[in-house]
Image: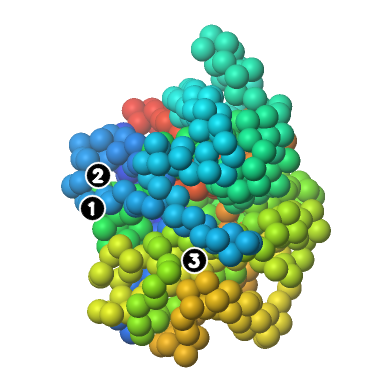
Amino acid sequence: MKKRATIIGAGISSLSTACYLAKKGYRVTVLEKNSTIGGRARQFKEKGFTFDMGPSWYWMPEVFEKFYNDFGYTTSDFYKLHRLDPSYQVIWEDKTVDPIPADLERLKELFDQYEPGSSEQLTAFLAEAKYKYELGMQDLVYKPGNSIMEYADLRVMKGIFKLHVLSSFASYIRKYFKNDKILSLLEFPVLFLGATPKNTPALYSLMNYADIVLGTWYPEKGMFGIIEAFEQIAKELGVEIHTGEKVTGIKSTDKNVTEVQTTNLQITTDILISGADYAFTDKTLLGKNANYSDKYWDSRSMAPSSLIYYLGIDKKIPGLQHHNLFFDAPFAQHATEIYDQPSWPKKPLFYACVPSKTDHTVAPQGMENVFILIPTAPDLSEDKNTREHYLDIVLKRMEQHCGEDIRSHIVFQKSYCGKEFKEDYNAFKGNAYGLANTLKQTGILKPKIRNKKLKNMFYTGQLTVPGPGVPPAIISGKIVADEVEKNYPIHQPTYK
């Protein structure tokens, strides 16, 4: 009889794990407490609008392609990809607006306008970033983070100093550029990694390579198309997916997890994987079998949470692109309010996504689908006026930029913040992006993917290796599936 692997949660990392385990021959069951799958990448529809609830940037397309290839498919079997040009636009503090071109030569021209001669520096900077990206994606990101010896590889050891792990991102990019706008453009991709650029390792310039060279894409009909593709593959491989099944208890026998209790089910399993929030699993589900103590979790540095608005607008809005970065307020002040002195920001930077600029299916004809995100410190308290206050702030600035009345054309409105992150995803401190990618929380210093007390229990997702984001979540699933196979081969019995 096939060994049974049970996975808690149906987010991207869980679905990835499920697919890889099923392909290896395990009998896989996925338990999701919400009524729909996808985790933070869920979708909802209202009044003719279709909203992706979380991820909206499709970067690192080769990671998706590799996943599909592993199951005999290609990306185009599930959805058509569009490369966005401009990749995004930036609204600056001096009220100027710059569409960021997808073409590298045109981007170099823009850099030279900012800072004469900086195009040559960009070439050198991207060469370093490419090296980090290729070494990182080929040799580092697929490591399970169990031991420092995983990195005792000749190629990795030779390249370790070129990765600039011990340098700060802020100081590193300032060796190449001086112009404030260039610095902001390069610091933007690391904004959500969970620390200020001065506390983020320069290794993450690999994100700039992903942004500038590999490009920003959009899957036709939205990011939820990724979830639908993963679900199709999983079901073809025989994975059972149960929604509306909240895990309420885990019982173990002889160091093995043997019984998982949910709202309606009781499942005996050989292997258990939690794709739910790692801290929640430890603190609430495992009790004495937790991998880490409450003190450990409270000492972790978390990536930001978010205040999100989903708006349906009954007209088109000139002046907005698919992706829009409102850098029309001081970057340093907002970063301090997220990371160093956690508080609601006085003048927040924010991001506005308008997928209806690219995709006519996500909004009724002649209307706009607008997703607005303000990064915030995790675990902030809010009162009933907080969300109205910040919506007023962002709408005023959007209207000023566009020269258009937006407020009176809102026909649908919904907000989402720390409270919902906790309720829907059991997110520790209401975080949206997992652990901060600081040096002390990178690689082998992240929470381990295997439980130290329950040897046949594993963890996947954004709080463990390789980290937050959609591509890392996909990779996390493969890492965990490989570790399960290594420790509990399909042909060997689990129980003694």
Where disc 3 sits, the SS reads strand
| Sooner in the amino-acid sequence: mark 2 or mark 3 | 2
Where disc 2 sits, the SS reads helix
Whole-angstrom CA distance, mark 2 to mark 3, is 26 Å
Question: Going 71% across and 82% down the picture, which residue do you hit?
Answer: 383
Q: Is residue 492 left or right of residue 347?
A: left
- The amino acid pointed to by label 3 is Ala
Residue topped by disc 2: 75
Label 3 or label 1, whichever lies nearer to me, is: 3
- Residue 486 at what x, y percent from top left? 44, 26
Circles 3 and 1: CB atoms closer than 8 Å: no
Question: Going 30% across and 62% down the picture, which residue do you hit?
Answer: 358
Q: Is residue 1 left or right of residue 417?
A: left
Where disc 1 sits, the SS reads loop
Q: Nearer the viewer, residue 101 or 487?
A: 101
Circles 2 and 1: CB atoms closer than 8 Å: yes
Residue 47 in which image quadrant: bottom left
Specify the label residue 79 is tagged with.
1
Mark 3 surroundings within 10 Å by alpha-carbon count, few (fewer than 14), some (14 through 19), many (20 or more): many
- Residue 194 at what x, y percent from top left? 65, 49
Residue topped by disc 3: 352
